[in-house]
Amino acid sequence: MVTPVPWKLLDDVSIWSQNWSWIPQPTRGPVEVKRSSCTLCANGCGIQIKMAGGWPVGVAGVARHPISKGALCPLAYGAHQLNWHPQRLTTVRHQASTSSWAAAQAAFSKACSEGTVVILDGHAGRAASTILETFAQKCNGSYRFVPSPEERALAPYQEWSGVATNALGYDLENAQTIVSFGAPLLDGWGTPGRFTRLWAEQAAGKTEPQLRLIQIEPTLSRTAARAWQWIPIREGAESALSSGLASIFIEEGLVSAKYPLPLLTLAEAADQSGVSIESIRSLARTIVARPPVVVIARDANPEIAALNVLLGAIAAPGGIVVKSKRAKPFLPSDSVIGSARAVLIDSSVPWEFVPHTDAEVFRFAAWDGGSNRADWLLPAPGFLEELTDIPTAPTSAIETYAVAPALTQSSSDVRNAVQFLSGIDSTLPSIEKIIRTRCEDLFHQHTGSVYDTEVSPLSKFESVTKFEESLWKGAIWVGVPPDATRFRCELKEWPAPTAPPPPENWTKTWAAPVLPPLASKLYQESSLREPPAGRNS
Amino acid sequence: MSRNTLGFAFGLAVALVVGWVVFPRVLYVQRAQPFEFRHKTHADKSGVADCGECHAFRDDGAYAGIPPTEKCTGCHSEKIGVSQAEATLVDVYIKPGHEIPWLVYSRQPANVWFSHAIHVKRAGLNCTECHSTYGESDQAKVYQVNRISGYSRDLWGHSISRLHRAPHDGMKMSDCEDCHRNHNVEVGCLGCHE
């Protein structure tokens, strides 16, 4: 202990252990930085990737990105590590044994000839989505979209207004009070960087923040811990509390128009939610105290959505707005899956989605989330390993378009669903061709701006080629918001109470999350942050 | 003096000698550079006045590091001296077009990211603040490699105790932290580890 031997050996051995042969090492070589969009979820945050010798070695946010504004989720910061994750799929697996691409294609072709196939997509609106839909149409199958909880939360407005769910978004930037019914706004909801940045600029650490976040949730989640106000309620009582709030809004004249009263009385709402009548009354007054107000549900819940209608948050600044005129409604997948001969699930569909069917399931995935969820498990490209385009993020208030090119190659034989189907039907269009067509469509509209190293109006671009080139290099096109006033939402009667989903035995379907080491560390450390000094709860 | 005390004193003396004298000599082994390189000769005879003339920044602002062989070819396409080093440079590397496998004194482990551009261009640090006056040396420094970690001794510094070191001696994480603290520059984990 009185010599440097143990201390120096400890240091050297720890460094030596970083260089064991089985630990992936970035290639030594020229370092360059490329800009792109994150493809881990449908939100497409702007990222800059540090490449060493042609391999990604670091991910950071792009400060000039109009939506994410330089912020990223912990997963994205370590996304370059995901491609080497131990759960990375590298071989085709059929019922837990190794198979081949040829065998998988033969099995899928056979299924197409024997009956109906259903193709499920998790990020609708991409060039790849068009190809998947085209294939489904050609083989008389069905193309369906598996919406995220954020998209499902917008579904009631589609029913009441006729505007497609994916054409709607939240104008968070203009809201002054956000009431979240369990939506993890500070924990990966929507475009993670968008609200994190907004909250950091307008609310973090302030006793009287410019933006009030009221979190209504049974547990003290990460979002609840940082919110301006946390309202603890009983599990599954969100609908009851929203009914109670609606009753007070109407009874006390806190909202201007006359609306149908909820079926639940205030006393019943208080009893079911575990929040006293006085507390509900106080909460209702707090909510309307600082408009514009928008209410966000964690998942589809018409009663919570109805609060936005009452509060006048539909088609209003700081509320729910229409971002696109082009979107078309999605059809539910449950009705067609049951009678299908085969179901092909794109890698964009999260592992949590399990089709309840006896059909043969072909599932694409870059990482193994449990082989018991598919007959065929097909290794898909990982992070930055495939070309894709990034249409507008689900919760965004404005239309965007970006391209994420393949910046690196996989070390194993991986294919995405489009490559797989193109091997069966060679007449399918390519992703590059569809991206080109979309760029042409946008270019000929002459609207919107392109966010590159600087912001330029699209009309300044000389040609489609120049515009497309800039998108391939990491720029993002941002559209012009359509006229929101044309969006009307009618609430003829208060929605019927939504029964909370029955508790699931999650241990049967739980799979270890695929996290890069860096994300685990960042996530742990984020728990150590102090909540805002003046938070009321 | 009892026998136990004598034994303890002897053991302590052996431990001290082994720990402070023998261990550092055994831990590091010398490696020869591909051939002799003299920074001073290049500064004096070729008029290379600034480190950045060879250790340049690329157009995108990134630091290019040790110059490629192509850079040497500008002057050494043919032998311009009679030394063994000149012959090796031209015959072994320039004419066949091979890159010179220099042993880099300051090479960090792969999990460390260091931006020369930020430190030199934005912070305005001189090269000598980290690399000492090596750029003026008349002889290539002896390259000592750690037998266990595989990295240069320059990272730990030449004092095994790391006490009483010159400011530029050592490139461990604590050295980076000290320098940042001295310059009142905050840095988080992700600044260097990505």
Image (spheres, grey):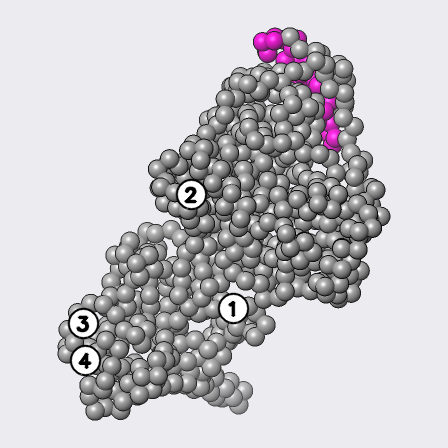
In the rendered structure, find residue B41 and report the number of the disc placed on it. Answer: 4
The front one of A230 and B56 is B56
Q: Real-space Cα distance between discs 1 and 3? A: 35 Å
Q: Which element type, helix, strand or loop, lies under badge 4?
A: helix
Answer yes or no: is residue B16 visible: no
Tell whether position A297 is magenta: no
- Mark 4 → mark 2, Cα distance in angstroms: 54 Å
Instruction: Give whichever of B7, B162 is nearer the camera.
Output: B162
Does A536 appear above or below B152?
above
Q: Which residue in the protein does label 1 denote?
A: A25
Which of the two discs, 3 and 4, labels the residue nearer the N terminus?
4
Question: Quick one: A470 or A69, which is closer to the camera?
Answer: A470
Tell me the crowding category of disc 1: few under 14, some 14 to 19, or many 20 or more residues within 10 angstroms, Cα based.
some
Read off the magenta span: A233-257
The residue depicted at 44 percent of the width and 69 percent of the height is A28
What amino acid is at disc 1? Gln
Q: Could you classify mark 4 by the number of other residues whose Cα lies within 10 Å: few (under 14), some (14-19), or many (20 or more)?
A: some
Tell me which residue sits at (63%, 28%) in the image: A164
Rounded to the nearest whole Å, what is the CA distance between mark 3 and mark 2? Answer: 47 Å
The answer to whether one can see residue A296 in this image is: yes
Discs 3 and 4 share one subunit: yes
Please tell me the numbered disc located at residue B48: 3
How far, Cα to Cα, is label 3 from label 4? Answer: 9 Å
**Measured along the vertical axis of the image, is residue A264 above or below residue A118?**
above
Q: Is residue A3 left or right of residue A367?
A: left
Q: Residue furthest front?
A: A427
State yes or no: discs 3 and 2 in contact (Cβ < 8 Å): no
